[in-house]
Image: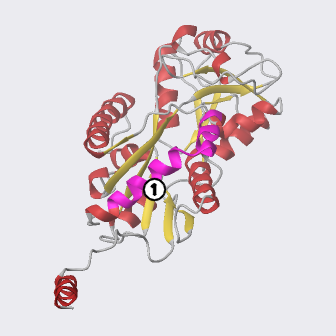
Amino acid sequence: MLFKRLISSVCLCLPLMAAAWEPSKPVEFVVPAGTGGGADQMARFIQGVVTKNKLMAQPIVVVNKAGGAGAEGFLDVKGDKGNPHKIIITLSNLFTTPLATAVPFNWRDMTPVSMLALDQFVLWVNEEAPYKTAKAFFDALKGGPDKAIKMGGTGSKQEDQIITVLLEKAAGKKMTYIPFKGGGDVAVQLVGKHIDATVNNPIEAESHWRSGKLRPLCVFDKVKMPYPEKLTATQSWADVPTCPSAGIPVEYLMLRGIFMAPGVTPDQQKYFVDLFARVRALPEWKDFMAKGAFNQTSLSGQAYFDWLAANEQMHRSLMKEAGFLAN
């Protein structure tokens, strides 16, 4: 009896182990871009698979805050210090928007969680366009008058226009750049022949390619996309040549990453690092990566921080060369 009392006394004196942190209310998932684009599609896909696979007890609510080329979303998260129930998916406007507009924001104002993947850019034309190859398009750009080709893109002084300027510099000719609200709108404009070309992400134009409306000419990367499954009767992502191999010396990859508000705790940060690791392990994620032809590089911790710092400097150099830096 005395032994049992001693054990009971010891147990009462031991501190209760704190449960690992998890969300206690719905998590707001901010998309600093318009609906239908690559970031929006990825966020809504994640929302669906987290719910389907019961990876989180609380729901995820996707909210688009695209104003000011994404500044609305970034400033919202920056200003919600210590709130662990808000996350944001980022694209290259993480770097380009503050550099182009001088909005008071830097990626260091948020808490990095993880890189989910890198997104490709593909040179697209309408299926009925005369350009059957990337070389034919580039030759037409080089040989034609300035501003004869209309290039559609997402926003001004953002990644689409950066690639457009790199193409112009390589060809020695100007194009007419027309900005739209999101990647989905850009693809629809090309289907309707209101523009001549785009540099949409694969997932933004994939359905139109499948339906025979658009044609991919090349990917802005030094290696081909490693997805051999046929999406049309004759072509897969792996069949799309690289732009450098076609004589177009332009490469560009875009971040798809997750951040939290500043001032969250390490446990709260770790919760989402672990959550997205579980998402990336799902078979549905692997299918999503193949559908969108993503580069499946993923990072967290110091490696992610170092990548962000290096890419901020890369974008500063690209935008300075393009004349896009705010005065």
Residue closest to the eye, 291 or 6: 6
Q: Tell me where residue 230 appears, x and y as whole percent.
A: 75, 23
Q: Position of residue 320 (x, y in %)?
A: 32, 32
| Image quarter (top left, top right, bottom left or bottom right) of the C terminus | top left
In the rendered structure, the answer to whether residue 194 lies left or right of residue 17 reads right
Foreground pick, 41 / 134: 41
Is 284 inside the magenta-drawn segment?
yes
Q: Quadrant of residue 195?
A: top right
Which residues are drawn in magenta?
Answer: 269-290
Q: Is residue 58 magenta?
A: no
Quarter of the image where the N terminus is located: bottom left
The amino acid on which the numbered mark 1 sits, given as a three-letter code, is Leu
Q: Which percent across, then down, holds residue 301?
A: 29, 46
Image position of 239 with respect to 57: above or below: above
Q: Main secondary structure of the magenta part?
A: helix
162 shown above or below 272: above
Q: Is residue 318 left or right of residue 139?
A: left
Element marked by disc 1: helix
**Rendering quarter of residue 321:** top left
**Is 147 above or below relative to 117?**
above
Residue 4 on image: x %, y %: 22, 87
- Residue with the mark numbered 1: 275
